[in-house]
Image (tube, rainbow, N blue to C red):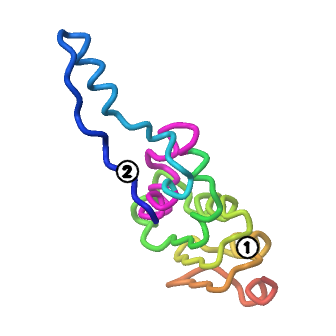
């Protein structure tokens, strides 16, 4: 993937206070104008919770749209979230939102504790390309629902 070109060499600075402002503005990058593939490359470094509740979705419209790209949601990992978010966020709702963001592109799902029959059926319905399902520890899934899914 090509990197961004280096900034242009410095030019002669205009004199006065107004010139300093112009210089500062010219050095700023327009992060909203990044190509989608570059934004997705950066956002792949974040985990599901950071994508959902962190800052990327609040930066600007183009970053918000990039966070909603199904490519970022092909692997949904809900492990280790129970202790951190149990009081503030329903992990079941967070998992359903992640599955919904994947727009049928989810290929791997990792879950523990909060996976129940309803969530498993939702996953089976919304993720036809699912290749790997990891249910860790005690999940409240009945064998009938598992067979149906």
Inter-mark Cα distance, 2 to 1: 39 Å
Question: Is residue 118 part of the magenta span, yes or no?
Answer: no
Residue 12's tag is none
Q: Rate crowding at label 1 as few (under 14), some (14 to 19) or many (20 or more) other CA atoms within 10 Å.
A: many
Task: State the residue in front, 47 or 148.
Answer: 47
The residue closer to the viewer here, 12 or 90, is 12
Query: Residue 29 lies in what quarter of the image?
Result: top left
Q: Nearer the viewer, mark 2 or mark 1?
A: 2
Give the percent coordinates (x, y) of residue 98.
Answer: 61, 61
Residue assigned mark 2: 5
In the rendered image, the vertical position of residue 110 relative to residue 143, given as above or below: above
Span highlighted in magenta in the image: 40-63
Q: Position of residue 61 (x, y in %)?
A: 58, 38
Q: Residue at x 65, y 62 (%)?
A: 70
- Residue named by callout 1: 127
Q: Position of residue 115 (x, y in %)?
A: 61, 74
User: Relative to residue 128, is residue 96 drawn left or right?
Assistant: left
- Asked whether 36 or 20 is in front, the reply is 20
Q: What residue appears at the point 70 percent right and 76 percent down from the top-left corner? A: 120
The image quadrant that residue 80 belongs to is bottom left
Magenta portion: prevailing SS class = helix
> Residue at position x 45%, y 66% from top?
81
Say few, some or many: other residues with alpha carbon within 10 Å of mark 2 (under 14 / 14 to 19 / 20 or more): few
């Amino acid at each position: 993937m090509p990197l961004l070109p280096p900034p242009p060499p410095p030019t002669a600075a205009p004199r006065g206070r107004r010139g300093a402002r112009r210089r500062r503005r010219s050095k700023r990058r327009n992060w909203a104008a990044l190509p989608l593939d570059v934004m997705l490359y950066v956002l792949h470094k974040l985990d599901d919770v950071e994508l959902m509740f962190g800052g990327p979705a609040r930066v600007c419209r183009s970053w918000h749209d990039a966070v909603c790209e199904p490519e970022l949601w092909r692997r949904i990992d809900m492990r280790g979230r129970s202790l951190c978010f149990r009081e503030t966020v329903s992990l079941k709702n967070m998992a359903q939102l992640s599955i919904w963001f994947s727009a049928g592109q989810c290929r791997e799902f990792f879950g523990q504790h909060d996976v129940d029959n309803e969530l498993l059926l939702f996953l089976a319905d919304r993720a036809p390309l699912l290749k790997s399902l990891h249910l860790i520890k005690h999940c409240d899934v009945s064998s009938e629902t598992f067979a149906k899914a």
